[in-house]
Image (tube, coloured by chain):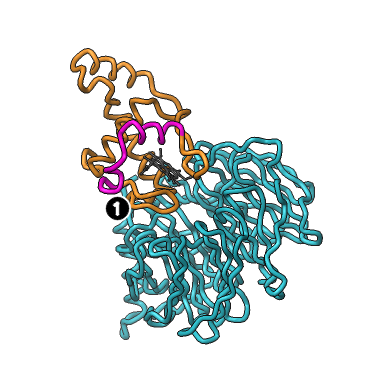
Protein backbone atom coordinates (compact mmCIF):
# COMPACT_ATOMS: atom_id res chain seq x y z
CA UNK A 1 0.00 0.00 0.00
CA UNK A 2 1.16 3.52 -0.65
CA UNK A 3 0.94 4.79 2.87
CA UNK A 4 2.18 8.25 2.11
CA UNK A 5 -0.38 8.92 -0.55
CA UNK A 6 -2.99 7.77 1.88
CA UNK A 7 -1.68 9.96 4.68
CA UNK A 8 -1.72 12.95 2.41
CA UNK A 9 -5.32 12.11 1.61
CA UNK A 10 -6.06 11.88 5.32
CA UNK A 11 -4.47 15.21 6.11
CA UNK A 12 -6.25 16.87 3.24
CA UNK A 13 -9.54 15.60 4.62
CA UNK A 14 -8.69 16.90 8.08
CA UNK A 15 -7.80 20.24 6.61
CA UNK A 16 -11.08 20.41 4.76
CA UNK A 17 -13.01 19.91 7.96
CA UNK A 18 -10.91 22.60 9.57
CA UNK A 19 -11.42 25.09 6.79
CA UNK A 20 -15.11 24.51 6.57
CA UNK A 21 -15.31 24.84 10.33
CA UNK A 22 -13.53 28.17 10.69
CA UNK A 23 -13.42 30.02 7.39
CA UNK A 24 -16.05 32.70 7.70
CA UNK A 25 -16.15 33.66 4.05
CA UNK A 26 -15.93 30.13 2.66
CA UNK A 27 -18.84 28.87 0.54
CA UNK A 28 -20.89 27.20 3.23
CA UNK A 29 -19.32 25.62 6.29
CA UNK A 30 -20.24 21.98 6.63
CA UNK A 31 -22.28 21.49 9.76
CA UNK A 32 -22.49 17.87 10.64
CA UNK A 33 -23.26 15.45 13.43
CA UNK A 34 -20.98 12.73 14.77
CA UNK A 35 -23.36 9.80 15.21
CA UNK A 36 -21.93 7.97 12.22
CA UNK A 37 -18.30 8.64 13.04
CA UNK A 38 -15.69 6.51 14.69
CA UNK A 39 -12.00 5.85 14.96
CA UNK A 40 -9.63 3.08 13.97
CA UNK A 41 -6.41 2.65 15.96
CA UNK A 42 -3.18 2.28 14.00
CA UNK A 43 -1.16 0.34 16.56
CA UNK A 44 2.24 0.45 14.91
CA UNK A 45 2.29 4.06 13.75
CA UNK A 46 0.68 5.82 16.70
CA UNK A 47 -2.13 7.07 14.49
CA UNK A 48 -5.87 7.21 14.71
CA UNK A 49 -8.05 7.28 11.59
CA UNK A 50 -11.34 9.14 11.89
CA UNK A 51 -13.98 7.40 9.79
CA UNK A 52 -17.52 7.99 8.61
CA UNK A 53 -19.32 4.66 8.74
CA UNK A 54 -22.29 5.72 6.63
CA UNK A 55 -20.15 6.83 3.73
CA UNK A 56 -17.51 4.19 4.54
CA UNK A 57 -14.60 6.52 4.19
CA UNK A 58 -11.73 8.04 6.12
CA UNK A 59 -12.11 11.67 7.18
CA UNK A 60 -8.78 12.31 8.85
CA UNK A 61 -5.60 10.71 10.05
CA UNK A 62 -4.42 11.93 13.45
CA UNK A 63 -0.72 11.41 14.26
CA UNK A 64 1.32 11.47 17.44
CA UNK A 65 -0.53 9.20 19.84
CA UNK A 66 2.51 7.15 20.91
CA UNK A 67 2.54 3.38 21.44
CA UNK A 68 -0.96 2.24 20.61
CA UNK A 69 -0.57 -1.49 21.13
CA UNK A 70 -3.58 -2.58 23.16
CA UNK A 71 -5.15 0.87 22.85
CA UNK A 72 -8.81 1.45 23.54
CA UNK A 73 -11.18 4.39 23.32
CA UNK A 74 -14.28 5.89 24.92
CA UNK A 75 -16.43 8.85 23.85
CA UNK A 76 -17.73 12.07 25.32
CA UNK A 77 -21.51 12.26 25.70
CA UNK A 78 -21.76 14.61 22.71
CA UNK A 79 -19.93 12.00 20.59
CA UNK A 80 -17.48 14.60 19.42
CA UNK A 81 -14.39 13.67 21.39
CA UNK A 82 -12.64 10.31 21.62
CA UNK A 83 -10.39 9.52 24.57
CA UNK A 84 -7.67 7.02 23.78
CA UNK A 85 -5.44 5.19 26.24
CA UNK A 86 -2.23 3.70 24.83
CA UNK A 87 0.22 1.16 26.12
CA UNK A 88 2.81 3.83 26.92
CA UNK A 89 0.52 5.43 29.49
CA UNK A 90 -0.60 8.14 27.09
CA UNK A 91 -4.13 9.54 27.41
CA UNK A 92 -5.18 11.50 24.34
CA UNK A 93 -8.34 13.45 23.60
CA UNK A 94 -9.15 13.67 19.89
CA UNK A 95 -11.68 15.99 18.26
CA UNK A 96 -13.45 13.93 15.58
CA UNK A 97 -14.79 16.96 13.73
CA UNK A 98 -11.51 18.78 13.47
CA UNK A 99 -9.49 15.59 13.08
CA UNK A 100 -6.85 16.56 15.60
CA UNK A 101 -5.54 16.11 19.10
CA UNK A 102 -7.06 18.45 21.68
CA UNK A 103 -4.87 17.33 24.56
CA UNK A 104 -2.42 14.55 25.32
CA UNK A 105 -0.84 13.59 28.64
CA UNK A 106 1.44 10.79 29.80
CA UNK A 107 -0.24 9.57 32.96
CA UNK A 108 1.55 6.29 33.76
CA UNK A 109 4.32 3.99 32.52
CA UNK A 110 2.14 1.25 31.11
CA UNK A 111 -1.56 1.40 30.63
CA UNK A 112 -4.19 -0.96 29.31
CA UNK A 113 -7.56 0.73 28.92
CA UNK A 114 -10.04 3.31 30.10
CA UNK A 115 -13.68 4.09 30.88
CA UNK A 116 -15.85 7.17 31.16
CA UNK A 117 -18.19 7.86 34.06
CA UNK A 118 -21.95 7.80 33.79
CA UNK A 119 -22.09 11.62 33.84
CA UNK A 120 -19.35 11.89 31.21
CA UNK A 121 -17.12 14.02 33.42
CA UNK A 122 -14.53 11.53 34.63
CA UNK A 123 -12.09 9.44 32.61
CA UNK A 124 -10.71 6.43 34.49
CA UNK A 125 -7.52 4.82 33.18
CA UNK A 126 -6.37 1.36 34.23
CA UNK A 127 -2.65 0.95 34.56
CA UNK A 128 -0.18 -1.91 34.80
CA UNK A 129 2.74 0.24 35.87
CA UNK A 130 2.38 1.66 38.43
CA UNK A 131 -0.58 -0.62 39.11
CA UNK A 132 -3.73 1.36 39.75
CA UNK A 133 -6.54 3.43 38.36
CA UNK A 134 -6.20 7.15 37.77
CA UNK A 135 -9.11 9.53 37.33
CA UNK A 136 -9.07 12.62 35.11
CA UNK A 137 -11.36 15.49 34.32
CA UNK A 138 -12.85 14.71 30.89
CA UNK A 139 -12.86 18.37 29.90
CA UNK A 140 -9.22 19.22 30.68
CA UNK A 141 -7.56 15.85 31.42
CA UNK A 142 -6.43 17.36 34.74
CA UNK A 143 -5.81 14.63 37.35
CA UNK A 144 -8.55 14.21 39.96
CA UNK A 145 -7.45 11.25 42.05
CA UNK A 146 -5.59 7.94 42.00
CA UNK A 147 -6.28 4.51 43.44
CA UNK A 148 -3.10 2.51 43.93
CA UNK A 149 -3.73 -1.20 43.77
CA UNK A 150 -0.35 -2.88 44.05
CA UNK A 151 -1.34 -5.03 41.08
CA UNK A 152 -1.90 -4.75 37.37
CA UNK A 153 -5.46 -3.63 36.74
CA UNK A 154 -7.71 -5.37 34.21
CA UNK A 155 -11.37 -5.41 33.25
CA UNK A 156 -12.22 -1.81 34.10
CA UNK A 157 -15.87 -0.89 33.45
CA UNK A 158 -18.09 2.08 34.24
CA UNK A 159 -21.26 1.37 36.19
CA UNK A 160 -24.40 3.30 37.06
CA UNK A 161 -24.13 5.51 40.13
CA UNK A 162 -20.82 7.16 39.20
CA UNK A 163 -19.08 3.89 39.91
CA UNK A 164 -16.22 2.00 38.30
CA UNK A 165 -15.46 -1.67 38.78
CA UNK A 166 -12.20 -3.46 37.95
CA UNK A 167 -10.14 -6.54 38.72
CA UNK A 168 -6.59 -7.07 39.92
CA UNK A 169 -4.59 -9.63 37.93
CA UNK A 170 -1.77 -10.17 40.40
CA UNK A 171 -3.71 -10.29 43.65
CA UNK A 172 -7.04 -11.80 42.56
CA UNK A 173 -9.36 -9.03 43.71
CA UNK A 174 -12.32 -7.05 42.41
CA UNK A 175 -12.65 -3.42 43.47
CA UNK A 176 -15.78 -1.32 43.23
CA UNK A 177 -15.03 2.41 43.34
CA UNK A 178 -17.57 5.15 43.96
CA UNK A 179 -16.60 8.46 42.35
CA UNK A 180 -19.50 10.56 43.65
CA UNK A 181 -16.73 12.77 44.98
CA UNK A 182 -14.18 12.56 42.15
CA UNK A 183 -11.32 13.73 44.33
CA UNK A 184 -12.03 11.26 47.11
CA UNK A 185 -13.09 7.91 45.70
CA UNK A 186 -14.38 5.29 48.12
CA UNK A 187 -13.68 1.62 47.46
CA UNK A 188 -15.29 -1.66 48.36
CA UNK A 189 -12.83 -4.53 47.89
CA UNK A 190 -13.60 -8.15 47.19
CA UNK A 191 -10.56 -10.30 47.92
CA UNK A 192 -9.79 -13.96 47.13
CA UNK A 193 -12.02 -13.93 44.06
CA UNK A 194 -9.81 -16.38 42.13
CA UNK A 195 -6.42 -16.59 40.44
CA UNK A 196 -5.48 -14.08 37.75
CA UNK A 197 -8.62 -12.34 36.58
CA UNK A 198 -7.69 -11.26 33.04
CA UNK A 199 -10.64 -9.12 31.92
CA UNK A 200 -14.16 -8.18 32.85
CA UNK A 201 -17.43 -7.05 31.38
CA UNK A 202 -20.47 -5.28 32.70
CA UNK A 203 -23.86 -6.26 31.29
CA UNK A 204 -25.47 -3.62 29.04
CA UNK A 205 -27.95 -2.72 31.80
CA UNK A 206 -25.11 -2.23 34.28
CA UNK A 207 -26.56 -4.87 36.57
CA UNK A 208 -23.81 -7.51 36.62
CA UNK A 209 -20.05 -7.48 36.44
CA UNK A 210 -18.31 -10.63 35.27
CA UNK A 211 -14.57 -11.24 35.51
CA UNK A 212 -12.86 -14.05 33.61
CA UNK A 213 -10.09 -15.98 35.34
CA UNK A 214 -6.89 -17.08 33.67
CA UNK A 215 -5.34 -18.95 36.60
CA UNK A 216 -8.33 -21.23 37.13
CA UNK A 217 -11.41 -22.39 35.26
CA UNK A 218 -14.37 -20.22 36.01
CA UNK A 219 -15.75 -16.70 36.11
CA UNK A 220 -16.66 -14.32 38.91
CA UNK A 221 -20.07 -12.67 39.13
CA UNK A 222 -20.85 -9.48 41.04
CA UNK A 223 -24.41 -8.16 41.31
CA UNK A 224 -23.93 -4.41 41.01
CA UNK A 225 -27.36 -3.80 42.53
CA UNK A 226 -26.37 -5.79 45.59
CA UNK A 227 -22.63 -5.63 46.08
CA UNK A 228 -23.20 -6.54 49.73
CA UNK A 229 -24.00 -10.05 48.52
CA UNK A 230 -20.41 -10.49 47.41
CA UNK A 231 -18.70 -12.14 44.46
CA UNK A 232 -19.86 -15.58 43.33
CA UNK A 233 -18.07 -18.12 41.20
CA UNK A 234 -19.93 -19.25 38.09
CA UNK A 235 -19.08 -21.96 35.55
CA UNK A 236 -16.58 -23.36 37.99
CA UNK A 237 -14.27 -25.96 36.43
CA UNK A 238 -15.64 -25.45 32.93
CA UNK A 239 -12.50 -26.96 31.47
CA UNK A 240 -12.58 -30.11 33.55
CA UNK A 241 -11.44 -33.17 31.67
CA UNK A 242 -9.95 -31.13 28.84
CA UNK A 243 -6.34 -30.09 29.34
CA UNK A 244 -6.03 -26.42 28.37
CA UNK A 245 -4.37 -25.51 25.09
CA UNK A 246 -1.76 -22.74 24.98
CA UNK A 247 -3.20 -19.22 24.74
CA UNK A 248 -1.30 -17.03 22.27
CA UNK A 249 -3.41 -14.00 22.96
CA UNK A 250 -5.52 -13.15 25.96
CA UNK A 251 -9.24 -13.20 25.22
CA UNK A 252 -11.31 -10.08 25.80
CA UNK A 253 -14.61 -9.90 27.58
CA UNK A 254 -15.48 -6.26 27.08
CA UNK A 255 -17.64 -5.95 24.03
CA UNK A 256 -21.01 -7.01 25.24
CA UNK A 257 -21.69 -10.44 24.00
CA UNK A 258 -24.94 -10.41 25.90
CA UNK A 259 -27.83 -11.42 23.72
CA UNK A 260 -31.22 -11.90 25.27
CA UNK A 261 -30.95 -14.20 28.26
CA UNK A 262 -27.52 -15.41 27.42
CA UNK A 263 -23.99 -14.13 27.61
CA UNK A 264 -21.32 -15.57 25.36
CA UNK A 265 -17.73 -15.55 26.53
CA UNK A 266 -14.51 -17.06 25.23
CA UNK A 267 -13.33 -20.18 27.05
CA UNK A 268 -9.68 -19.75 28.06
CA UNK A 269 -7.39 -22.40 26.65
CA UNK A 270 -10.22 -24.12 24.79
CA UNK A 271 -11.46 -23.67 21.28
CA UNK A 272 -14.94 -22.95 22.52
CA UNK A 273 -17.37 -20.16 23.21
CA UNK A 274 -19.26 -20.61 26.47
CA UNK A 275 -22.94 -19.70 26.62
CA UNK A 276 -24.10 -18.58 30.07
CA UNK A 277 -27.79 -18.63 30.93
CA UNK A 278 -28.40 -15.36 32.79
CA UNK A 279 -31.50 -16.67 34.59
CA UNK A 280 -29.58 -19.38 36.38
CA UNK A 281 -25.95 -18.28 35.82
CA UNK A 282 -25.08 -21.76 34.66
CA UNK A 283 -23.55 -23.05 31.46
CA UNK A 284 -26.22 -23.41 28.81
CA UNK A 285 -24.05 -24.59 25.95
CA UNK A 286 -20.53 -24.58 24.64
CA UNK A 287 -19.94 -23.97 20.99
CA UNK A 288 -16.86 -25.46 19.30
CA UNK A 289 -15.06 -22.83 17.23
CA UNK A 290 -11.98 -22.52 15.01
CA UNK A 291 -9.43 -21.47 17.64
CA UNK A 292 -8.91 -19.60 20.91
CA UNK A 293 -11.64 -16.92 20.74
CA UNK A 294 -10.49 -13.35 21.45
CA UNK A 295 -13.53 -11.13 20.88
CA UNK A 296 -17.06 -12.50 20.96
CA UNK A 297 -19.29 -9.65 19.84
CA UNK A 298 -23.06 -9.58 19.45
CA UNK A 299 -24.68 -7.94 16.45
CA UNK A 300 -26.94 -5.18 17.79
CA UNK A 301 -30.08 -7.17 16.93
CA UNK A 302 -28.70 -10.04 19.07
CA UNK A 303 -29.33 -12.60 16.39
CA UNK A 304 -25.66 -13.39 15.75
CA UNK A 305 -22.29 -13.05 17.34
CA UNK A 306 -19.05 -12.69 15.45
CA UNK A 307 -15.88 -14.23 16.84
CA UNK A 308 -12.21 -13.69 16.06
CA UNK A 309 -9.27 -15.79 17.19
CA UNK A 310 -5.80 -15.76 18.67
CA UNK A 311 -2.62 -16.55 16.74
CA UNK A 312 -2.23 -18.84 14.77
CA UNK A 313 -5.94 -18.84 13.80
CA UNK A 314 -6.15 -15.07 13.56
CA UNK A 315 -7.05 -15.07 9.88
CA UNK A 316 -10.46 -16.57 10.62
CA UNK A 317 -13.79 -15.07 11.63
CA UNK A 318 -16.79 -17.13 12.62
CA UNK A 319 -20.44 -16.23 12.84
CA UNK A 320 -22.61 -17.91 15.48
CA UNK A 321 -26.38 -17.97 15.12
CA UNK A 322 -27.99 -17.43 18.52
CA UNK A 323 -31.23 -19.21 17.80
CA UNK A 324 -29.40 -22.48 17.32
CA UNK A 325 -26.12 -21.70 19.13
CA UNK A 326 -24.17 -23.03 16.15
CA UNK A 327 -21.51 -21.67 13.83
CA UNK A 328 -23.22 -20.73 10.57
CA UNK A 329 -20.30 -19.25 8.69
CA UNK A 330 -16.51 -19.30 8.67
CA UNK A 331 -14.71 -16.48 6.89
CA UNK A 332 -11.05 -16.00 6.01
CA UNK A 333 -11.03 -12.30 5.26
CA UNK A 334 -7.37 -11.45 5.78
CA UNK A 335 -4.25 -11.70 7.89
CA UNK A 336 -4.29 -10.96 11.64
CA UNK A 337 -7.92 -10.05 12.22
CA UNK A 338 -7.67 -8.08 15.47
CA UNK A 339 -11.03 -6.49 16.09
CA UNK A 340 -14.61 -6.10 14.88
CA UNK A 341 -17.11 -3.31 15.50
CA UNK A 342 -20.74 -3.24 14.40
CA UNK A 343 -22.30 -0.04 13.17
CA UNK A 344 -24.94 1.17 15.63
CA UNK A 345 -27.85 -0.55 13.87
CA UNK A 346 -25.83 -3.62 12.94
CA UNK A 347 -26.05 -3.38 9.16
CA UNK A 348 -22.26 -3.37 8.80
CA UNK A 349 -19.37 -4.79 10.72
CA UNK A 350 -15.94 -3.21 10.40
CA UNK A 351 -13.00 -5.57 10.74
CA UNK A 352 -9.32 -4.75 11.10
CA UNK A 353 -6.83 -6.92 9.20
CA UNK A 354 -3.54 -5.88 10.78
CA UNK A 355 -1.10 -7.66 8.50
CA UNK A 356 -2.97 -6.64 5.35
CA UNK A 357 -2.97 -2.99 6.44
CA UNK A 358 -6.68 -2.78 5.75
CA UNK A 359 -10.00 -2.20 7.39
CA UNK A 360 -12.70 -4.38 5.85
CA UNK A 361 -16.36 -3.41 5.90
CA UNK A 362 -18.83 -6.31 5.77
CA UNK A 363 -22.49 -6.15 5.03
CA UNK A 364 -23.74 -8.31 7.91
CA UNK A 365 -26.70 -9.76 6.04
CA UNK A 366 -24.75 -11.05 3.02
CA UNK A 367 -21.40 -11.26 4.88
CA UNK A 368 -19.77 -9.78 1.77
CA UNK A 369 -17.05 -7.15 1.91
CA UNK A 370 -18.58 -3.91 0.65
CA UNK A 371 -15.66 -1.52 1.25
CA UNK A 372 -11.96 -1.59 2.10
CA UNK A 373 -10.04 1.24 3.74
CA UNK A 374 -6.23 1.32 3.73
CA UNK A 375 -4.69 1.80 7.18
CA UNK A 376 -1.27 0.79 8.53
CA UNK A 377 -1.56 -1.99 11.19
CA UNK A 378 -5.16 -1.34 12.19
CA UNK A 379 -6.33 -2.71 15.54
CA UNK A 380 -9.26 -1.46 17.65
CA UNK A 381 -12.30 0.07 15.94
CA UNK A 382 -14.58 2.26 18.05
CA UNK A 383 -17.77 3.93 16.81
CA UNK A 384 -19.16 6.97 18.53
CA UNK A 385 -22.41 5.31 19.63
CA UNK A 386 -20.35 3.78 22.44
CA UNK A 387 -20.86 7.18 24.10
CA UNK A 388 -24.30 6.06 25.19
CA UNK A 389 -23.65 2.51 26.22
CA UNK A 390 -22.95 1.38 29.75
CA UNK A 391 -19.71 -0.56 30.09
CA UNK A 392 -18.17 0.38 26.75
CA UNK B 1 3.17 -21.54 9.97
CA UNK B 2 6.10 -23.54 8.64
CA UNK B 3 9.78 -22.74 8.08
CA UNK B 4 10.08 -21.83 4.42
CA UNK B 5 12.31 -24.26 2.62
CA UNK B 6 14.31 -21.75 0.55
CA UNK B 7 15.27 -20.17 3.85
CA UNK B 8 16.38 -23.50 5.19
CA UNK B 9 18.68 -23.70 2.16
CA UNK B 10 19.98 -20.23 2.87
CA UNK B 11 20.64 -21.25 6.45
CA UNK B 12 22.55 -24.29 5.16
CA UNK B 13 24.63 -22.07 2.93
CA UNK B 14 25.42 -19.86 5.88
CA UNK B 15 26.37 -22.94 7.87
CA UNK B 16 28.90 -23.95 5.29
CA UNK B 17 30.30 -20.43 5.05
CA UNK B 18 30.76 -19.51 8.66
CA UNK B 19 30.19 -21.87 11.57
CA UNK B 20 29.77 -18.97 14.01
CA UNK B 21 26.67 -17.66 12.25
CA UNK B 22 25.63 -21.19 11.42
CA UNK B 23 22.13 -21.04 12.74
CA UNK B 24 21.14 -17.52 11.84
CA UNK B 25 17.84 -17.42 9.95
CA UNK B 26 17.94 -15.78 6.51
CA UNK B 27 16.98 -12.14 6.05
CA UNK B 28 13.40 -12.83 4.96
CA UNK B 29 12.79 -15.09 7.92
CA UNK B 30 14.45 -12.53 10.20
CA UNK B 31 11.93 -9.94 9.04
CA UNK B 32 9.11 -12.38 9.80
CA UNK B 33 10.55 -13.05 13.24
CA UNK B 34 10.78 -9.34 14.03
CA UNK B 35 7.19 -8.90 12.88
CA UNK B 36 6.10 -11.81 15.08
CA UNK B 37 8.01 -10.36 18.03
CA UNK B 38 6.63 -6.85 17.74
CA UNK B 39 3.09 -7.81 16.87
CA UNK B 40 2.24 -11.19 18.34
CA UNK B 41 4.66 -11.38 21.26
CA UNK B 42 3.86 -7.68 21.58
CA UNK B 43 0.24 -8.58 22.40
CA UNK B 44 1.51 -9.51 25.87
CA UNK B 45 4.95 -7.93 26.07
CA UNK B 46 4.02 -4.64 24.39
CA UNK B 47 4.96 -3.62 20.88
CA UNK B 48 8.03 -1.90 22.28
CA UNK B 49 8.65 -4.91 24.53
CA UNK B 50 8.44 -2.80 27.67
CA UNK B 51 6.05 -5.28 29.24
CA UNK B 52 2.36 -5.64 29.82
CA UNK B 53 0.78 -8.86 30.92
CA UNK B 54 4.12 -10.40 29.93
CA UNK B 55 7.31 -9.12 31.54
CA UNK B 56 9.53 -6.47 29.99
CA UNK B 57 11.96 -7.92 27.41
CA UNK B 58 14.22 -4.85 27.32
CA UNK B 59 17.94 -5.71 27.49
CA UNK B 60 18.37 -4.46 31.07
CA UNK B 61 15.40 -6.49 32.28
CA UNK B 62 16.59 -9.79 30.83
CA UNK B 63 20.30 -9.18 31.52
CA UNK B 64 20.30 -11.52 34.51
CA UNK B 65 18.76 -14.46 32.69
CA UNK B 66 20.86 -17.00 30.71
CA UNK B 67 20.36 -17.36 26.97
CA UNK B 68 19.45 -21.00 27.41
CA UNK B 69 16.69 -20.19 29.87
CA UNK B 70 15.28 -17.49 27.60
CA UNK B 71 15.40 -19.84 24.60
CA UNK B 72 13.70 -22.57 26.60
CA UNK B 73 11.06 -20.10 27.83
CA UNK B 74 10.27 -19.09 24.26
CA UNK B 75 10.10 -22.65 23.00
CA UNK B 76 8.32 -24.31 25.91
CA UNK B 77 6.59 -21.42 27.65
CA UNK B 78 6.46 -21.01 31.43
CA UNK B 79 3.87 -23.36 32.88
CA UNK B 80 1.70 -21.69 35.49
CA UNK B 81 2.05 -18.30 33.76
CA UNK B 82 0.42 -17.00 30.57
CA UNK B 83 3.70 -17.39 28.61
CA UNK B 84 2.78 -19.97 25.93
CA UNK B 85 5.13 -22.41 24.16
CA UNK B 86 6.17 -21.31 20.66
CA UNK B 87 7.87 -24.56 19.63
CA UNK B 88 5.18 -25.31 17.03
CA UNK B 89 6.11 -22.09 15.22
CA UNK B 90 9.79 -21.50 15.95
CA UNK B 91 12.90 -23.63 15.63
CA UNK B 92 15.51 -23.56 18.37
CA UNK B 93 17.81 -21.51 16.12
CA UNK B 94 15.08 -18.98 15.52
CA UNK B 95 14.38 -18.67 19.24
CA UNK B 96 18.11 -18.19 19.83
CA UNK B 97 18.24 -15.53 17.14
CA UNK B 98 15.29 -13.76 18.82
CA UNK B 99 17.12 -13.81 22.15
CA UNK B 100 20.15 -12.20 20.46
CA UNK B 101 17.84 -9.63 18.95
CA UNK B 102 16.31 -8.91 22.36
CA UNK B 103 19.74 -8.61 23.97
CA UNK B 104 20.60 -5.86 21.51
CA UNK B 105 17.34 -4.07 22.14
CA UNK B 106 16.16 -4.76 18.61
CA UNK B 107 19.02 -2.81 17.06
CA UNK B 108 19.91 -5.31 14.36
CA UNK B 109 16.57 -4.56 12.72
The subunit carrying tag 1 is A
**Residue A35 appears in the picture as rendered:** yes
Placement of the N terminus of chain A among the 4 image quadrants:
top left
- Percent x, y of residue A199: 56, 57
Mark 1 residue crowding within 10 angstroms, few (<14) / some (14–19) / many (20+): few
Q: How many numbered circles are shown?
A: 1
For label 1, the residue is: A5
Quadrant location, the C terminus of chain A: bottom right
User: Residue B107's spot in the image, x, y percent?
Assistant: 21, 42
Q: Is residue B27 left or right of residue A20?
A: left
Q: Position of residue A68 (x, y in %)?
A: 38, 58
Chain B shown in which color?
orange
Q: Is residue B40 above or below residue A65?
A: above
Q: Please give the name of the residue rendered at 29% of the width and 53% of the height, measured from the top-left corner.
A: A5
Prevailing secondary structure of the magenta residues: helix
Q: Is residue A82 visible?
A: no
**Magenta includes A83?**
no
Judging from the image, what is the letter of the chain drawn in cyan?
Answer: A
Q: Secondary structure at mark 1?
A: helix
Residue B39 percent coordinates (x, y): 39, 45
Q: Looking at the picture, does residue A24 appear above or below residue A267?
A: below
User: Residue pushed farthest top?
Assistant: B16
Front residue of A177 and B6: A177
Along the line of sight, the residue nearer the viewer: A85 or B103: B103
Q: Which residues are magenta?
A: B58-76
Choose between A207 and A121: the one closer to the eye: A207
Q: Nearer the viewer, residue A349 or B18?
A: B18
Amino acid sequence: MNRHAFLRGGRAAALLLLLTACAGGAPSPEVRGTGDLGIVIGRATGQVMVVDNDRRRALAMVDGLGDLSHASAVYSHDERYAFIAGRDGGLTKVDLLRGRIVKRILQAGNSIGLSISEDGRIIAVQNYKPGGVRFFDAETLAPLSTLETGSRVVGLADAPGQRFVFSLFDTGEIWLADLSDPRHPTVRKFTDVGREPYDGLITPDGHYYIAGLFGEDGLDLLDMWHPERGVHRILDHYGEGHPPLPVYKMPHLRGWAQAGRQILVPAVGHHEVLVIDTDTWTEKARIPVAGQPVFVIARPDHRQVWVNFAFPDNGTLQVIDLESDTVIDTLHPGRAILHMEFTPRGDQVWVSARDDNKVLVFDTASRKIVATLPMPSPSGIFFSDRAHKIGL
Amino acid sequence: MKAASPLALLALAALAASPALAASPGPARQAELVHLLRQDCGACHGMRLKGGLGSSLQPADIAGVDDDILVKTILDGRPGTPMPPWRPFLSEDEARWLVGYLRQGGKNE
